[in-house]
Image (cartoon, helix red, strand yellow):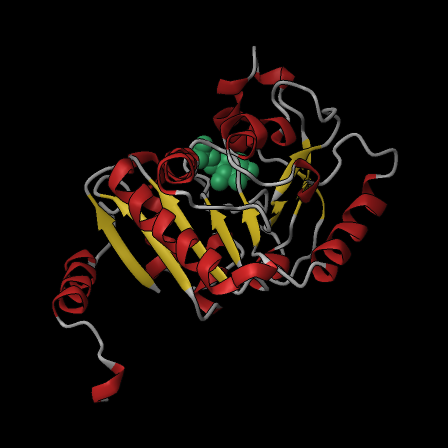
Amino acid sequence: MEIHIVADAEAGAQVVADTFARTLQEAGPSGAVLGLATGSSPVPTYTELIRRHREEGLSFADSRAFLLDEYVGLPAGHDQSYHRFIRENFTEQIDIDDAAVVSPNGAAADPIAEAASYDRRIAEAGGVDLQILGIGSNGHIAFNEPGSSLNSRTRVVGLTRSTITDNSRYFDSPVDVPVRALSQGLGTILEARRIVLTATGASKAAAVAQLIEGAISSRWPATVLQLHPDVVVVVDEAAAAELQLADDYRYARRLEIENPLDVTQV
Ligand code: GLP
């Protein structure tokens, strides 16, 4: 894992946006397949990418995007649907084709069939080049709650009490939060070629410590990312507070910046 401990969310957004820019550049004219996440954590990154699009000409014109998850029972236009969230906070403000922004249909008559077809649609698009992730305070990624199979596929999942409580801030009351979601599985997420996870604030400190330093276990689903060969983790000081080896990660980053690898001399 490439671990960045940054001063604040804005500094983190620069690092994550750089990862997007690199992925877009590598994809070239055929376009990148982006894996997008909702929640508050990616929003500073989306804001920075919108700025780079407007001011620096960063283009998403040939890209496609797949969302991680969606609440079951909320129609696409519902003001708390992830379908709507990603459009308002990101994709309507860049030059990606709206039809190329795909999410699981939370209002599907048969959510189980919808889940099965979602992985197929990602595969048909050639797989995800870059997946951005947040992390729940209980260590979930997408809606893979503790107890999720480490090789799970996109499926219908039940939400835990702690996630319903965490996410109730977006709803009028906790009873309005849907109890189920369609979520990419941990196995689905691991198929993305590059993953960048971002977290800020003390409420994420325990989950971040497990993600980086804990044993791989479905108790903390994000720990499965330790198996992925290309993961960038970007956290602020508060989210890094429970890392035992934070100084080592800072030192490693500093060494890399001071001694960039010159492949012509290796
Ligand atoms: C939700 C989403 C996750 C997200 C998590 C954390 O449960 N399904 O994808 O990472 O919340 O959200 P936030 O970034 O707002 O803390």
**Residue at image point 23% right, 37% down:** 8
Residue 146 in sight from this viewpoint: no
Number of numbered discs visible in the structure rendering: 0
Of residues 103 and 220, the one nearer the viewer is: 103
Left or right relative to 78: residue 135: left
Where does the C terminus fall, quadrant-wise?
bottom left
Residue 159 in the image: state x and y as whole percent.
62, 35
Where is residue 69, by image quadrant?
top right
**Residue ranking furthest to the top:** 172
**Residue at image point 54% right, 56% down:** 218
**Residue at image point 56% right, 51% down:** 34
Residue 238 in sight from this viewpoint: yes
Where is residue 156, by image quadrant?
top right
Residue 5 in the image: state x and y as whole percent.
23, 50
Above or below 82: residue 215: below
Left or right relative to 177: residue 55: left
Left or right relative to 250: residue 228: right
Residue 19 in the image: state x and y as whole percent.
39, 55
Residue 66 in the image: state x and y as whole percent.
63, 47
Of residues 10 and 136, the one nearer the viewer is: 10
**Residue at image point 35% right, 65% down:** 1
